[in-house]
Image: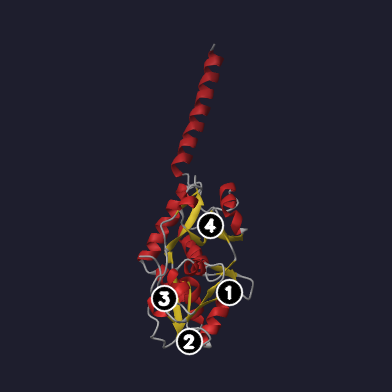
Amino acid sequence: MKWQKLLALGMAAVMAAAFAAGCGADKTAAPDKGKKIVVGLDDNFPPMGFKNESNEIVGFDIDLAKEASKRLGREVEFKAIDWSSKEAELKSGRVDILWNGLDITEKRKENMLFSEPYMDNRQIIFVKKGNTDIKDEASMAGKVIGTQSSGTAEEYMDNSAFFKEQVKEVKKYSDYVSAFMDLENGRIDAVVGDEITGRYYMSKHQNTLDAVDVAMGEVSTFGIGFAKDNKQLRDEVQKVLDDMKADGTMAKISEKWFGKDIIKK
């Protein structure tokens, strides 16, 4: 049965070639190499990520993500999402990363992976330029203090006996810009609020405000969120972030947006 032997040998050769080709592909495979990274964000969160006058998405986190993607050799797309549904967007694969001033919490850790923290989210004191009377929480006794309604600082002060009993008034505003304008005009003595928001405002009004570098209440931290099963991408991004911190790139981006290096050391 010479023809049967020849057929068998032929089939074996084909299978061997296919196996060899498959093995070669496995050795060189990089399934994510060059694949676009889709970043989910709330595009109305200055200075982390927001639309400028030209309707372009810009911000501190945007600059970080662009530089990280460049170093990974991958294109990046910024996708505005309903921030209240961010975990569902990540789990479904509609976005690859959540990168937009995302607080790291134990509850969120149940549903996603996080990078290492890259920035503290603190509540600090802002005063009018030249004010040396207010240097900590205790020195705000008898003063009129402003903050934004429905924010972390408001919650802290509402639950503080000191602010209830010793501060003259806590004045609440619909947004921080209004509070800072009243501070500049001398209508209030200080503003207590988000450091990132305040320092961004200060970077645009360098001659009118000062920051008192004292944290009030609990300090949370920002991290980048990834799907639970996407450890590979998390590790790749973390590696380039570590490099960007080591070579000073993250500090430069921070100084651009906040006028100071506030990257977590």
Q: Earlier in the sequence, mark 3 or mark 4?
A: 4
Q: Earlier in the sequence, mark 1 or mark 4?
A: 4
Q: Mark 3: which amino acid?
A: Lys
Residue position for label 1? 175
Helix, strand or loop under label 3: loop
C-alpha separation, residue under disc 1 versus residue under disc 3:
23 Å
Q: Mark 1: which amino acid?
A: Asp
C-alpha separation, residue under disc 1 versus residue under disc 2:
18 Å
Residue position for label 3? 260
Q: Are marks 2 and 3 in contact (CB under 8 Å)?
A: no
Q: Going 45% across and 74% down the picture, which residue do you hit?
A: 165
Q: Mark 4: which amino acid?
A: Leu
Q: Which disc number belongs to residue 208? A: 2
Which of discs 1 and 3 lies nearer the camera? The answer is: 1
Q: Earlier in the sequence, mark 2 or mark 3?
A: 2
Badge 1, how many Cα within 10 Å: few under 14, some, many 20+? few
